Image: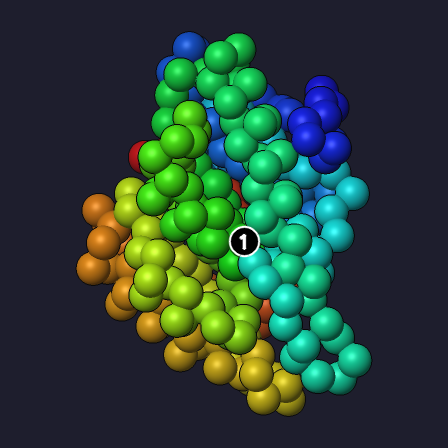
Amino acid sequence: MICEFEGKAWNLLSFGTLGADSPFIVLLAGDDAADTVTDKLAETGAPPLWLAAPVNVNWDEDFTPWRADVGGGREFSGGADAFGRSVCAMCSHARGELSRGKYFIVGYSLGGLAALYLHSKLCEKTEETVKFDGCGSCSGSLWYPGWEEYLKLHPPGGRIYLSLGGKEKNTRDALMATVADATEKTRQIAAKSADEVVLRLEPGGHFRDPDGRLARAVAWLCR
């Protein structure tokens, strides 16, 4: 089912036999992530749940919290705040029409960065009708310039799941090679404010089994 909120299209799928309090997962990954991750959920023991993923994502805009020039001709435009308005509108609709259960936001790569960013931001905005009970950042781009400083000022609550491929730091890109240290620092900062934090080391590099990593994050958050 495709729905549109604040100018963004979302793909809404269900997994299992749903109840009124089934978990609702916002999934920030590729355009087909809702379908492919759903296929992996059966292997994880996850409960019945809703899954919502944005369609036609511009990763360098929608999933980046502020502007950043990382060299090599690649610039991030920092559109996550605008994207977040669509997330909130979609979740508000879902809260009224689909599920009164717990809400989680989970993402991969830059989507993992955006998931943590939006979760931490909504934790402290009392006027928002939708807050997330937890967050999953799988192979998150936590090397992003300014991320550590931001997180110290905006600590996340709830339950936090972090995962990273053991070989992800073995890259020629000097900034992205800091991802292991950045992820560990994120874990340390989040541990001071969150209810529970876990960091799981996955086999392989950044592109190995993204759907499985996301499915395992969802299952842990929903357990």
Q: Where is 167 relative to 123, above or below?
A: below
Indicate the secondary structure of the residue bearing disc 1.
Answer: helix
Q: Where is 143 relative to 109, above or below?
A: below
Give the percent coordinates (x, y) of residue 20: 42, 10
Which residue shows up at 59% across the image and 27% down it?
A: 90
Residue 37 vs residue 140: left or right? right
Task: Tell me, yes or no, if residue 141 can be seen here.
Answer: yes
Residue position marked by numbered label 1 in the rendering: 114
Q: Where is 137 relative to 91, above or below?
A: below
Residue type (three-letter) at the residue carrying disc 1:
Ala
Near-viewer residue (97 or 37): 97
Location of residue 36 (image quadrant): top right
Which residue shows up at 48% across the image and 41% down it?
A: 105
Which residue shows up at 39% across the image and 50% down it?
A: 120
Please tell me how crowded label 1 is: few (under 14), some (14-19), or many (20+) other residues with Cα within 10 Å. many
Residue 129 vs residue 97: left or right? left
Near-viewer residue (25 or 8): 8
Give the percent coordinates (x, y) of residue 6: 68, 31
Which residue shows up at 68% across the image and 38% down it?
A: 54
